[in-house]
Amino acid sequence: MKILITTDLFTVTTNGVVTSVKNLYEELDKRGHDVRILTLSEDIHSHKDGNVYYIRSLPFAVYPDVRMPIAFRHRLMKELIEWKPDIIHSQCEFFSFQFAEYIGKETSAPIVHTYHTLYEQYVNYVFPSRRIGRKIVRTFSRKRLEGVSRIIAPTKKVENTLHGYGIVNNMTIVPTGISLKQHQVRVPDEILKLKRRELKIDDDKVVMINLGRLGTEKNLGELIELFAKAKNLYENLVFMIVGDGPARKELEELSQRLGVSEHVIFTGMVDPKEVQNYYQMADVFVSASTSETQGLTYVEAAANGLPLLCREDLCLRDVLKEGENGFAYNNEEEFLAAIKIISQNEKWRRDAAEISREIAAAFDKTKFGAAIEKVYLSVIEKNK
């Protein structure tokens, strides 16, 4: 098949959408398909790098990392139209979706769309009223998706959300796959001990880790507050926050106000090739976010043998077995009860680590590529 993938972001940042697109591209390419990616450039110049087509763009101020195109009917677009894709897979609802619609109209290629992001969690970046923002998101999503041939929801949570918007037809759940190979390799103990020494973490400490973008939607302030309470009960705890983002300064100030700044470590951005070192030097992955559609970092953490302690959320359904490889909490009392077990019971952590690894194996990107390929073939057959 000739497959065109459109996405607003591809190399300018690392997030769940970018990870999904890269993994999908690699798997479809392995399966012998002719795959091309159409995205926005990081500057005002359009260019082509192998099978990736970059359309010139400018920063779009309402949200960090978002860009908007300043060219539409570009020669690169013409080249893709002449290539005549068999199917178009859109990954974003905004600017690159317009690319997908335009090329689809010119070539009669059906459009498959993956709905990655729960925008209701982000309306505070754009709208002064959360209620109005949510209403706009629901209306926008319905209008945007009414013309696509198939909608892919990464999880039941996304499917339920779209059903709530009145979008009920032509939907398939396909969990996003990750590259498990990197995360399944056991990092040698000497490297993990060296990393701990670099971060001034004693060997007897139990390390809570959160890895990802530091944005308000991730609710990291709640985790720091809960950590401060847990630290008063269990002296052996340390909280390591891996990543960067607009909320970092506010979070650092919060840890100072709560008197735990010496025990909360902000690493900043780390090399993606070394994230397994950070996961495996930790003892438990924690999250208070309810904005995740699937939570790929949960899967990564599990693949690295970490138990999970996360705020209750539907996206946890397939990756967290309550009491076996982690706990979902709804309040402070439940968090503290869980962290007591995790921090004080080394045998439980070892057993949970093995269960986490077994669960993560279901999210291998090879299975992801095969499932998406099956969707494409179904859509093409239906549109003949």
Image: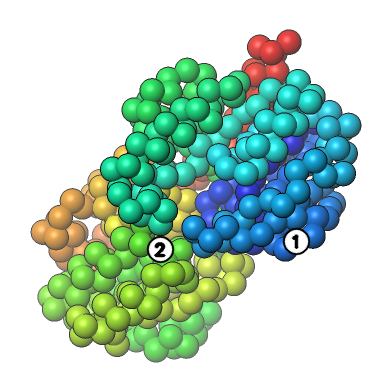
Residue hosting label 1: 44
Label 1 to label 2: alpha-carbon separation: 27 Å
Residue 205 in sight from this viewpoint: no
Residue appearing at x 26%, y 77% in the figure = 254
Marking on residue 84: none
Few, some or many residues within 10 Å of mark 1 (<14, 14–19, 20+):
some
Q: Which of 253/307 is in front?
A: 253
Q: Where residue 341 sits in the image (x, y, percent)? A: 19, 62
Residue appearing at x 50%, y 27% in the figure = 143
Residue 195 in sight from this viewpoint: yes
Marking on residue 215: 2
The quarter of the rendered structure image containing the C terminus is: top right
**146 vs 118: above or below:** above
Q: Where residue 226 sits in the image (x, y, percent)? A: 20, 68
Q: Are marks 1 and 2 in contact (CB under 8 Å)?
A: no
Q: Which of 35/306 is in front?
A: 35
Q: Where residue 165 sits in the image (x, y, percent)? A: 37, 28
Q: Which of 153/47 is in front?
A: 47
Q: Where residue 93 sits in the image (x, y, percent)? A: 55, 39
